[in-house]
Amino acid sequence: MTARIRVQSAGRRGVVLALPGGETVKASVSGVVYRDSGGPVCGDVVEAVPESPRWRVTSIAERTSVLTRTSPLGKPQVLAANIDRVLVVASICSPALRRGFLDRVLASAEHTGLNCSVVLNKTDLAADPEAASLTEIQRVYGDGAGYRVLTVSAKTGMGMEQLSTFIEGQTVVLTGPSGAGKTSVAMLLNPRLDLAVGALNQKTSRGRHTTVAARLLHLWGDTWMMDTPGLRAFSIEHIPAGELWLCFPEFRGLEPCRYRNCLHDSEPGCPVRDGVASGSIDRERYDSYLKLLGEIREGRPGGVRE
Ligand SMILES: Nc1nc2c(ncn2[C@@H]2O[C@H](COP(=O)(O)OP(=O)(O)OP(=O)(O)O)[C@@H](O)[C@H]2O)c(=O)[nH]1
Ligand SMILES: [Mg+2]
Ligand SMILES: [Zn+2]
């Protein structure tokens, strides 16, 4: 007897499966599955047989969507599968918002055709002189790039109702730097979850990598959330140079460039560059694009830490 089941979390020593009734079981993975696909990831749908003492995963169903980065070893690495939407979580301060990180994750999600949105957490700290400007982020990522920008506070609960309505009926993945408050957001959406939240490093105001493995969480009904570990680096060298510009929505839909294979970095007659010069395209987003393009061209192994 086999059953089609979702992977709640995947590690080196096996996986945890979420059975349809809500129960979870540990399972090993057949060697052939590792060989053919690199092994299951969080969110995979698998076939598994209930063997003793552990279940055994015998195959992975075709993935409807994936979130991918280039691993520190320089290989494409699937972080999560079968997702409806990526929520890039950033805190407006503590730790400081790094726009370059947002741009990397958004570009990677765009490349595999995933819906993505920005969640700005810790808005209770908006008066902090170090805090990023909500208006500015809305201008660049909302009005400019067309992403939905949700502002929340996992401390006060502000914005959580809008967030729950927004993700209703979807499987969403939370990704972002350590300490941004991903796990805190998940727990506010389903207070029955009992997960570890970590205090920041007082000296650096950075997170302490509290969440160590991606985990599929049941929020309610058919709404699911994957909480993932804060990433130190998010390289995207797996994206071909000529496809990167398509991962920046505000570069698309302009007049055609003079040169058909324009990479929008130095060629004349380029509406992307004109847009940057006239201010209709945000310069920092464009600079992120150039930086990523450089990394892809050089194929720098391990990528750059943001
Ligand atoms: N002031 C404030 N603090 C928050 C908020 N959300 C989370 N925190 C705090 O930020 C710290 C990090 O929260 P976590 O939820 O563990 O962050 P994370 O993104 O899951 O971090 P990793 O698991 O390490 O990737 C904790 O001390 C939380 O209490 C918020 O909205 N406002
Ligand atoms: Mg966490
Ligand atoms: Zn161009």
Image (cartoon, rainbow, N blue to C red):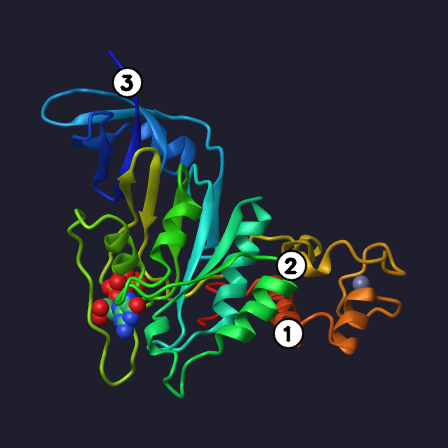
Eyeballing the image, is 265 above or below 13? below
> Mark 1 sits on what residue?
287
CA gap, disc 2 and disc 1: 12 Å
> Mark 3 sits on what residue?
3
> Mark 2 sits on what residue?
248
Residue shown at 33% from the left, 27% from the top: 46
Residue shown at 85% from the left, 57% from the top: 255
Which kind of residue does numbered mark 2 sit on? Answer: Phe
Which kind of residue does numbered mark 1 sit on? Answer: Asp
What element does badge 1 sit on?
A: helix
Upstream in sequence: badge 3 or badge 1: 3
Which kind of residue does numbered mark 3 sit on? Answer: Ala
Compare residues 17 and 300 and report the one nearer the observer. 17
Report the disc number at residue 110: none
* View extreme (top): residue: 1
Image quadrant in which you'd find residue 201: bottom left
Local crowd size for mark 3, using a 10 Å CA cut-off: few (<14), some (14–19), many (≥20) = some
